[in-house]
Image (spheres, rainbow, N blue to C red):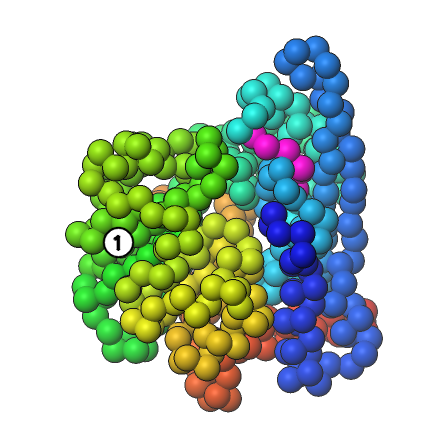
Amino acid sequence: MADRSYNAFEMAQSQFDKVADQLDLDEATRDLLRYNAREYHVSIPVRMDDGSFKVFRGYRVQHNDSRGPAKGGIRFHPMETIDTVRALAMWMTWKTAVVDIPLGGGKGGVICDPHNLSMREQEQICRGWVRQLSRDMGPVNDIPAPDVMTNAQHMLWMLDEFETLRGERLPGFITGKPVGMGGSLGRTEATGYGVIFTVREALKALDIPPAKTTASIQGFGNVAQYAIELFNRIGGKTICVSSWDQKDQTSYSFKKSSGVDLDELRGITDRFGGIDKDKAKGLGYEVLPGEAWIEQKVDILIPAALEHQITKENVSKINDSVKIIAEGANGPTTPEADEVISKRGIFMIPDLLANAGGVTCSYFEQVQSNMNYFWDKDEVLGKLDSKMTSAFNAVSELAEKRKLYMRDAAYVIAIGRVAQASKDRGWV
């Protein structure tokens, strides 16, 4: 996100264009789906703890809602841009379509750095964002959720502000809430577990026993931690993770050939997923440069941080041992890098499939909130496993049948479903 020469929305559009040609979409359908239906730019004035005022810029983009209400997270990030939000909203439309849940795509963001904000200041940003957008959001038209550097507490503040403005109890307005306040059991684990459900299925397709595999993961936030947890449970071993160091303003990779100890690392990690490098050294981890995660001799790579991480500049560093890449993050691989990965025959599980566990479980939470009835954790995770496995099989079968790259197969299914819904509604 920090690379201003990179435009995520242009990348998302180029991915769409490629598949639109394969589907032979008419010009009107291309014009509808290539751009976002609506976008909002807002200013959020906040009285800071020192008494001064500061104005934060925020966004909400609704890409397409032909298949259901817009759905997508809100992220807090100092380098957030409208083009990043536009791209993420479009990717959310394809993601909800590929797992076949009745939702569209949206995304939100605020340009801020929670590392440097008190909890009171963060609360005021949350409430201010909702005040600006409440007329254009709600449980039947646009449902937010957590994303980068936002969490259940942020969602609860947003819900409280929305319900106060509406004068109603509307827990289905937002997902990712605390479990005791209308959140769903299993939601915390959902995205990371979903990644590994697809990895498990890919290993089956490649006839590789999970117990014989190793992984390297970029990031150590919620997605990465739960991916490691389930990967360990199915018999795999993670030997390297990376994380951002706020103090040094750079990233580091942490390697332990015998396998990282998840509980051990969680004990020296801040709430943003930053691992204390000095404590890690004391626990026997080799501390390497941030990009070292991509160079490891492993079977599986899982980029689970931000977009634009596997590029034409570093794709050649991927070790020949790598058989699977599972995109836990949104848009981590550029089209140029994709071409190289495809030619090398690495099995790619694209972001709109691999990390769709989060939005799928968000949908479950939304349904439960609207019904005022809640399922137990095993039932939620069982439903998630079923949805992710079914989506993987559909994409894999199409890829095999039409000799497509997995990303292209996923896009063909997703864009085809959204295009058909738009035609059925008479929009094009």
Q: Residue 357 location in percent, x, y?
A: 45, 56
Q: Quadrant of residue 134?
A: top right
Please state which amino acid type lies under the numbered disc 1. Ile
Judged from this view, the residue extending furthest toward the top is 51
Find numbered disc 1 in the image and state the secondary structure of the residue it sits on. strand
Residue at (67, 71) in percent of width and height? 14
Q: Residue 37 location in percent, x, y?
A: 78, 58
Residue at (48, 88) in percent of width and height? 403
Residue at (72, 43) in percent of width and height? 59
Judged from this view, the residue extending furthest toward the bottom is 402
Q: In this rendering, is residue 174 above or below 236?
A: above
Q: In this rendering, is residue 206 above or below 282?
A: below
Q: Which residue is mark 1?
A: 239
Disc 1 packing (10 Å; few <14; some 14–19; many ≥20): many
Instruction: Look at the image and give the residue range highlighted in magenta.
Output: 109-114
In this rendering, position of residue 13 left or right of residue 316: right
Q: Residue 426 location in percent, x, y?
A: 80, 71
Q: Residue 126 in magenta?
A: no
Q: In this rendering, is residue 320 above or below 279?
A: below
Front residue of 160/254: it is: 254
Task: Note whether residue 163 is visible.
Answer: no
Residue at (40, 66) in percent of width and height? 317
Which quadrant is the C terminus positioned in? bottom right
Image mark count: 1
Task: Note whether residue 250 is visible.
Answer: yes
Q: Residue 161 location in percent, x, y?
A: 67, 27
Q: Quadrant of residue 320?
A: bottom left
Front residue of 226/83: it is: 83
In this rendering, position of residue 389 left or right of residue 111: left
In this rendering, position of residue 108 left or right of residue 194: right
Q: Residue 111 in magenta?
A: yes
